[in-house]
Image (cartoon, helix red, strand yellow):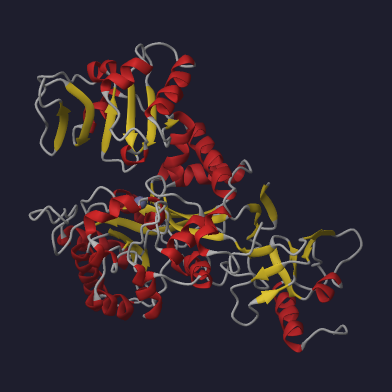
Amino acid sequence: MTNGTTRREFLGTLAAFSLFPLEHEKPDLLLHNGHIVTMNPAEPFAEAVAMARGRFFAVGKNADILNLAAPGVRKMDLAGKTVLPGFIDAHSHPADAGLMHLRMVDCDLRSISAIQAALRERAAKTPAGEWVLGFKYDDTKTEDGRPLSIADLDAAVPDHPVHIQHRGGHTSYSNSLAFRKAGIDEKTPDPPGGKIDRDPATGKLSGRVAESANTYFEKAIPHNFTRDDHREGVKLISKMLAKTGITSAHEAQGTPDDLRAYQDARDSGDLLFRAYCLINYRYIDAMIAAGTRTGLGDEWVRVGAMKLVCDGSISERTARLSAPYEGRPNDFGILVMTEEELYTYGRKAHLAGWQIGTHANGDVGIDTTLRVYERLQKESPRHDPRFRLEHCTIINDDLIARIKALGAIPTPFSTYVYYHGEKMRYYGAERLNHMFALRTFLDAGIRATQASDYPPGEFIPMMALQSEVTRTDTKGNVWGPKQKITVEEAIRVGTINGAYASYEENLKGSIEVGKLADLVVLGRDPLKENPSTLVTIPVERTMAGGRWTFES
Ligand SMILES: [Zn+2]
């Protein structure tokens, strides 16, 4: 024991040595002179940290950690910067988003003319007649105060079919050539469950279609992604996530293609975040037949829960509610799968040792999902099943008691209040106090996570902190102030709670000896920041497994 080493630090070092045989392990990197917020309750703050082979080797005071330095070891002076554990996004769609960013125009722009310019630029690089595709368009976020029209798109790109998906994913906007290629004209009737928008005066196509009418375009647009494209998509989104401090993401709607893409990207050195891959229920038979279950894999790519979908969406107002949407007295939203279907798939997965994650937004959707989980546990009790409630947006006291009793894990949208605040008025002020209900979850001892649902939601962890702490949107409107949490709680939600949701709380989520060396270095300290500027805190560096995945 060196001078100045406390007993606890010495024991911490012993723990490291018990994981790594002493004769083989020396730290290969030291970070010192930092303000390290560990999220380890036994040692909440530290000045320095040593890494060996991708894991934390020692955590403590500058002098003690620097004492561990053998000659030639890499040392970095953090100059007082704040370090947090790497962020874990517990519900996102990175593989799909990566492909979209690879092939499509990002239409998250603030004016119709900016969108037109971006489309024109892409068309100039695209052979005539081939599709120009866009995504992340949001009609509520352009300064024009009106949606994109078919004339806007024809003016920007006349010689290529243009098709743009709305950020929420349920509506799309196209130019005249795209409508012709999709086989739609003014006389085409609305398909069941869909709508082809027309000018009420002239009957001419407006450019927008909704819900099942999108399938006309889906059929007309060639989907020719190669295995390499999938890997490239993961590579691209890896860089985007790493830049914001994310070191792990739970892929919320994984397919075998996605699982392979993550493995391909890992093998080529392009995977910069750890992927916990939930598997769409349509593949569960094949996955079970192959002998796989939740947890298979390694610390970079792991098979996650089976994913089911119970009800609709919050941003596009199709979540199933017990009381109707504001101003729409007969609209209670929709249920996507029946309770019996959820049970049938759920039982199969539950008996085969799978974790289950069910998309459930509205209070009726959550109630239905909990009933299925309760039944599964009653009929076939399993130790520590960690049932997940994807989104789990609108809650009440009864649901909270049942979530607590089951030990279920909600993954509420982290950035919606800040980023999509203007869409929240459809829920009414009172209901907003029961939405994205982190205060209620944490007070009840429920381990809710940080979750973006990107692309529909933004994934920036600093935005999640601001959204959760202030419950305030970009225009200064406050939505559901009773659900505010503290910055420290928001960090916990975004780190160790995310690790728990994938059964990895002993592997990551805090800066602790023996855990994976995943961390983020920030330009300012979120614990001292004015909550209304948390989103502006710069991410300077991100590390996953002892390797810098982003350096500013
Ligand atoms: Zn999702």
Give the x, y percent position of residue 459.
47, 51
Number of labelled discs?
0
Q: In the visual, does 15 lie left or right of 63?
A: left
Give the x, y percent position of residue 107.
41, 33
- At horizontal 31% and vertical 43% (from top left) the residue drawn is 168
Between 42 and 198, the one lying in front of the other is 198
Asked whether the viewer can see residue 537, the reply is yes
Q: Pick out the residue farthest to the right.
A: 71
Between 351 and 427, the one lying in front of the other is 427
- At horizontal 66% and vertical 71% (from top left) the residue drawn is 514
Q: In the visual, does 532 lie left or right of 397?
A: right
Task: Please tell me whether residue 119 is drawn above or below residue 375 in the rendered image.
Answer: above
Q: In the visual, does 145 lie left or right of 364?
A: right
- At horizontal 45% and vertical 66% (from top left) the residue drawn is 469
Instruction: Please tell me in which quadrant of the rendered image residue 39 appears.
Output: bottom right
Quarter of the image that includes the N terminus: bottom right
Task: Please tell me whether residue 313 is drawn above or below residue 1 in the rendered image.
Answer: above
Task: Please tell me whether residue 430 is drawn above or below residue 91 in the rendered image.
Answer: below
Asked whether the viewer can see residue 290, the reply is no
Between 40 and 355, the one lying in front of the other is 40
Give the x, y percent position of residue 539.
62, 53
- At horizontal 33% and vertical 56% (from top left) the residue drawn is 307
Task: Please tell me whether residue 156 is drawn above or below residue 234 in the rendered image.
Answer: above
Give the x, y percent position of residue 161.
33, 18
Q: Pick out the residue farthest to the front.
A: 476
